[in-house]
Image (cartoon, rainbow, N blue to C red):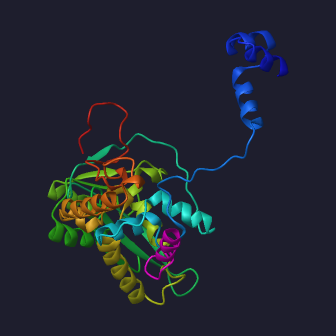
Amino acid sequence: MGAYTELTAAGVTTRDAAGLTGVSRATATRRRARTAPGPRTAVEPANRLSRVERERVLEVLNSDEFVDQPPAQVYATLLERGVYLCSIATMYRILAAAAQVKERRRQARHPARAIPELMADGSGQVYTWDITKLPGPAKGVYYDAYVMLDVYSRYIVGAHVHARESGPLAEEMMKEIFGVHGVPTVVHADRGTSMTSKPVAALLADLGVTRSHSRPSVSNDNPYSEAWFKTLKYAPVFPDRFGSLADARAFMAGFVETYNHGHRHTGIGLHTPADVHYGHAATVSQQRSAALAAARATHPERFSTTADPKILALPTHAWINQPTAAEPVAA
């Protein structure tokens, strides 16, 4: 290293000095930087929040209203109220600094699959449904929750809780849903006994609805229903057991109402399912953009672009197993 320094001091180029001494220029540059005289002073970023601002963000995140919600949900809710505190990433950094970031859920891992391939570019086109078990008042006692949702809007169009699983009950649920929300083009489900039952098959055939089923033992072929069940059962309010069938039905009714009208879904631009399902998303997007524009005008140094964050963009399509080919696949 000393020879390299002497050669460069004498006017030899760094390339030639590196070739003569065998010391790479990158190594020499790092060593000179470490041995440079004088104290180093850290330059604080211009867009850094002040201590008071960071404390305010943490106070909001830990408030009774938001303590059980992830930063993305808090971010979207505040924007709709015309309030901008900081970005989602900054919220996570502040929580991490306070040792308040951790994953509460078990993460599932499923292999990528290609079939079936379904696409929806609007509400009312593709419905998916499944049945999940709700724990009853005693060990071994369970209730069956039949849940159908719209793939594009993520809106729960129907949720019924029964003491058993059967095809006629599934048929009854579908008749009620189709009467309220209209008949979809496709109904997708796994291959459970109710999903493949004759009453359900006959009803869908009579209405001209295309039936779609997951492949055997491939739960990822029905991702929207499976994801919603995870949202349900890992919610802080989900009980260990339900005292009765009536309790389970009351809980599901309240949870679905809150989810449809209060949950900001990351898959639909942090909109609520109801806003997307009923066409109110454009108005909400305008309110959010106005709040961000006002924040940029107040603190331009905290923004690197005038575009709204991509997480707020509503996708144009929703897929079940999107194909890799460029050609679109009809639902």
Q: Which residues are magenta?
A: 52-68
Corner quadrant of residue 300: bottom left
Number of numbered tags placed on the structure image? 0
User: Residue drawn 39% across and 74% down?
Assistant: 145
State the image coordinates of residue 43 (x, y, percent, origin top left): 58, 50
Task: Point out the residue furthest to the right here.
Answer: 2
Q: Residue at x 63, y 50 (%)?
A: 42
Q: Residue 48's spot in the image, x, y percent?
A: 50, 58
Q: Is residue 181 magenta?
A: no
Q: Is residue 57 magenta?
A: yes
Of 167 and 86, nearer the camera is 86
Percent position (x, y) of residue 63?
A: 48, 80
Is residue 308 left or right of 233 when viewed as pictured? left
* Viewer-side residue, 251 vs 142: 251
Name the one closer to the observer, 9 or 314. 9
The answer to whether residue 151 is left or right of residue 10 is: left
Is residue 103 in view from this perspective?
Answer: no
The answer to whether residue 218 shows anywhere in this view is: yes
Residue 236 lies, in percent from the top left, at 50, 77
Q: Quadrant of the C terminus?
A: top left
Q: Quadrant of the N terminus?
A: top right
Above or below 27: residue 196: below
Left or right relative to 40: residue 45: left
Q: Residue at 34% of width from left, 70% of height from top?
A: 83
In the rendered structure, the answer to whether residue 290 lies left or right of residue 42 reads: left
- Is 89 or 72 nearer to us in this picture? 89
Quadrant in the picture for residue 257: bottom left
Q: In this picture, is 151 found above or below 112?
A: below
